[in-house]
Image (cartoon, rainbow, N blue to C red):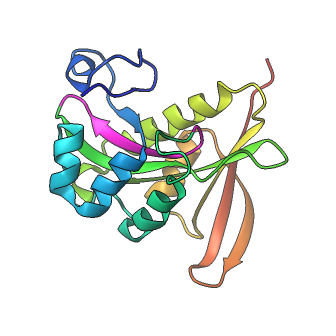
Amino acid sequence: MELGILGLSNSVTISEVAMTDVRLSLVDGTLALLSAAVAGDRALETLLDVSVADEWAGFPEALHMIRESYRTSPDGQRWGSLFFVDPRLRMLVGFGGFKGPPSSDATVEIGYAIAPAFRGQGLATEAVAQMVRRAFDDATIRAVDAHTLGQMNPSTRVLQKSGFQRIAELDDPNDGLIWRWRRERVAS
């Protein structure tokens, strides 16, 4: 199966990516991929032709809602979900993407999760870098936002390394203190 891999030709397969220097391939979500994700790891392994790491989704409860949002555009969404594949291992190691189209102030928000067995290897930092690059490839985007729990943790470090600045503290009714992060487009 051919998958569009960020930064490479849309006709590149995961096996061809394994021969490049790409550490992480971001595969655009589709209704078929999200339906497979909801159905279970076996269905996803078959469709992606990769192994699936335990707890790859980070927030599996969100998969149903995300899948439903793809019913109107089953082939994918420019500002949608991304499956994180390690092409060398041929392993699905994480999930994330954009939380919707740009806001009225030309900002997009990203989210990401890496399977526990693959944390601490720079994969979240790589995923964030690729999502930021993708966002800023659109000349109309002026900033990329992200949210973390309101305490220092590995995700806050990923964002700091990726050039994000903490810009606000929010009180979320479900999660408590949340920090809002932003990376502005660098003027050229």
Residue shown at 33%/23% (left/top)?
22
The residue nearer to you, when weighing 45 against 127, is: 45
Residue shown at 37%/44% (left/top)?
83
Q: Position of residue 169 (x, y in %)?
A: 72, 69
Q: Which residues are magenta?
A: 78-88
Considering the image in quadrants, where does the C terminus appear? top right
Position of 9 compared to 133: left or right?
left
Total marks placed: 0
Q: Magenta stretch: residue 85 in it?
A: yes
Position of 30 compared to 120: left or right?
right
Q: Position of residue 167 (x, y in %)?
A: 75, 56
The residue nearer to you, when weighing 119 against 67, is: 67
Residue shown at 63%/34% (left/top)?
135
Q: Is residue 179 above or below residue 181?
A: below
Residue shown at 72%/72% (left/top)?
170
Q: Is residue 44 above or below residue 130?
A: below
Which residue sits furthest right? 105
Which residue sits furthest front? 72
Position of 84 compared to 178: left or right?
left
The residue nearer to you, when weighing 156 against 30, is: 30
Q: Is residue 12 above or below residue 60?
A: above
Q: Position of residue 68 (x, y in %)?
A: 49, 61
Q: Is residue 141 above or below residue 35?
A: above
Position of 114 compared to 75: left or right?
left
Is residue 53 visible in the rendered structure shown here?
no
Q: Position of residue 162 (x, y in %)?
A: 56, 39
Q: Magenta stretch: residue 77 in it?
A: no
Considering the image in quadrants, where does the N terminus appear? top left
Is residue 29 visible in the rendered structure shown here?
yes
Query: In which quarter of the view is residue 54 placed?
Result: bottom left
